[in-house]
């Protein structure tokens, strides 16, 4: 199985900060990577697909980049409602696998 | 707006079979272009893809669960189901159903709210 390693595992930032989360795949996954946001007690919400495509309705402060094994997820200006856990997910190789998550808190 | 809703027992005894159903509303499960998935999340942990099914009945399973897993579809009821046999405490998790498109992109764009299944005697 492809291992997806996110870093950091947790992050504290201030409103307005630029926040970056990385996801590293254990082997080349091209651009077959998605990002999700999960708030406590809720299902994950798709934010980014195909490494960099923004899902319809998702604010433009969210973005993604990368290909191969190294990917980045960025929030350009952190808002209070962005407090959540963020997961990456690869689909280049079955089984589909997810990163362990990055918990984002407000400082 | 597509909606998914999981249903089933919240408590299952060890060695028994976990059975869940996902009811789809706001769209047809027989629509070409979508797979219907099960995903689980162990308490406080990450997400694990279980498997998905097409309306025709074609399935794709996570090899780690394949020997215990059956996913089926009932197009007349707009539902799909999960059966996991010989459960242990390690199967305690929140189980989600979700939709993902076919055609090469595998992302989960609609999710149910999730249902907690506890395996305990």
Image (spheres, coloured by chain):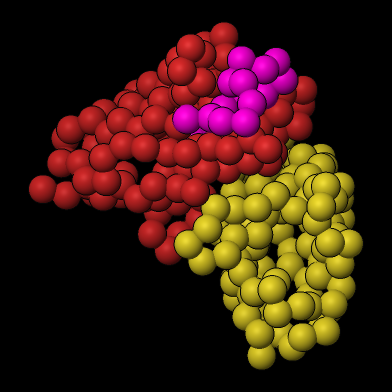
Chain colours: A yellow, B red
Specify whether residue A25 is painted magenta: no
- Residue range in magenta is B23-40
**Does residue A20 sit above or below A6 in this rendering?**
below
Q: Nearer the viewer, residue A59 or A104?
A: A59
Count of numbered labels shown in the rendering: 0
Q: Residue furthest left?
A: B121
Q: Residue at x 38, y 59 (%)?
A: B43
Q: Residue furthest top?
A: B56
**Does residue A61 sit above or below B83 in this rendering?**
below
Q: Quadrant of the N terminus of chain B?
A: top right
Q: Can residue B112 be seen here?
A: yes
Specify whether residue B37 is painted magenta: yes
Q: Is residue B119 left or right of residue B34?
A: left
Q: Residue at x 71, y 28 (%)?
A: B101
Q: Nearer the viewer, residue B85 or B82?
A: B82
Q: Residue at x 70, y 34 (%)?
A: B106
Q: Can residue B90 be seen here?
A: no
Q: Is residue B2 left or right of residue B61?
A: right
Q: Which quadrant of the structure image shows residue B2?
A: top right
x, y percent for residue A83: 64, 74
x, y percent for residue B96: 48, 43
x, y percent for residue A93: 66, 33
x, y percent for residue A21: 74, 68
Q: Residue at x 76, y 32 (%)?
A: B105
């Amino acid at each position: 199985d492809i291992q997806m390693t996110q870093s950091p595992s947790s992050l504290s930032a201030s409103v307005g900060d630029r926040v970056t989360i990385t996801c590293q795949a254990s082997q080349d996954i091209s651009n077959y990577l998605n990002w999700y946001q999960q708030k406590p007690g809720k299902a994950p919400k798709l934010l980014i697909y195909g490494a960099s495509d923004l899902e319809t309705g998702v604010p433009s402060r969210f973005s993604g980049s990368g290909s191969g094994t190294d990917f980045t997820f960025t929030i350009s200006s952190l808002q209070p409602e962005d407090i959540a856990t963020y997961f990456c997910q690869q689909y280049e190789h079955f089984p589909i696998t997810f990163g362990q998550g990055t918990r984002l808190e407000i400082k | 707006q597509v909606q998914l809703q999981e249903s089933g027992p919240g408590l299952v005894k060890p060695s028994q079979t976990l059975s869940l159903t996902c009811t789809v509303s706001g769209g047809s499960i027989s629509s070409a272009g979508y797979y219907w998935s099960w995903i689980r999340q162990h308490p406080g942990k990450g997400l694990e893809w279980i498997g998905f099914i097409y309306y025709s009945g074609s399935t794709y399973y996570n090899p780690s669960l394949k020997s215990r897993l059956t996913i089926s579809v009932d197009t007349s009821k707009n539902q799909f189901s999960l059966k996991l046999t010989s459960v242990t405490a390690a199967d305690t998790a929140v189980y989600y159903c979700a939709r993902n498109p076919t055609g090469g992109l595998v992302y989960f764009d609609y999710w149910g709210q999730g249902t907690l299944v506890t395996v305990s005697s």
